[in-house]
Amino acid sequence: METPETTVDPHGTMRPQDHGSPRARRRKAACPLTLWRTRDPARISPAEVLRLAKLLAAIEILHERRWKAARTGDAAAAAAVAMDHLHGRASRTRLTDVILGNLVVLAFGGDATAGVIIAHALETFGRLDPTDPALTQLARRWGAAPAFHAATHASGSSRPRVD
């Protein structure tokens, strides 16, 4: 299995991949960074969120001074990083997965804004790629998810412990 990189260049783009092959499907399913765009939030387990949080703890985003605060649970910093990244973006990148993956962790910690931003991103990417109706369906689920996350995963902390 390929290991995710630990440094992401904000200007990097995702290379086209063969998502139809069994290997690509396993890699896609195995990578927690894609949970925001591949899974219904009601079907994401706390163990998956913890795995994602551990992965994000090891990732640095070059030239993004707010990232450390964002990945350690500062909801305002996470929202700002995400909105700045999404502004004017016409396609997903690996960096998009990292930034929105961080919002998954915050959403599961009860941050309502995180789910709304994920829904906005999915809705936008769904409009840009009308051949993928799953994005719009997921957008609706994430838009309704903040109350779900706050009610089912409230632990008093907006971030799972990763030590």
Image (cartoon, helix red, strand yellow):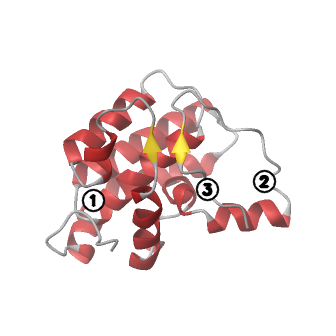
- Give the mark nearer the N terminus: 3 vs 2: 3
Mark toward the viewer: 1 or 2: 2
Give the label on residue 19, or none.
2
Q: Secondary structure at mark 2?
A: loop
Mark 2 surroundings: few (<14), some (14-19) or many (≥20) residues within 10 A: few
Q: Nearer the viewer, residue 15 or 130?
A: 15
> Compared to 38, does 148 lie above or below?
below
Residues under labels 3 and 2: Cα distance?
17 Å
- Residue depicted at x 78% and y 59%: 24
Question: How many numbered tags mark residues here?
Answer: 3
Q: Are marks 3 and 2 in contact (CB under 8 Å)?
A: no
- Residue depicted at x 40% and y 47%: 118
Relative image position of residue 144 (x, y in whole percent): 33, 57
Relative image position of residue 104 (x, y in whole percent): 39, 57
- The quadrant in which residue 111 appears is bottom left
Query: Which residue is the site of mark 3?
Result: 4
Residues under labels 3 and 1: Cα distance?
28 Å
Q: Amino acid at mark 3?
A: Pro
Which quadrant is the N terminus positioned in? bottom right
Query: Which residue is the site of mark 1?
Result: 146
Residues under labels 1 and 2: Cα distance?
30 Å
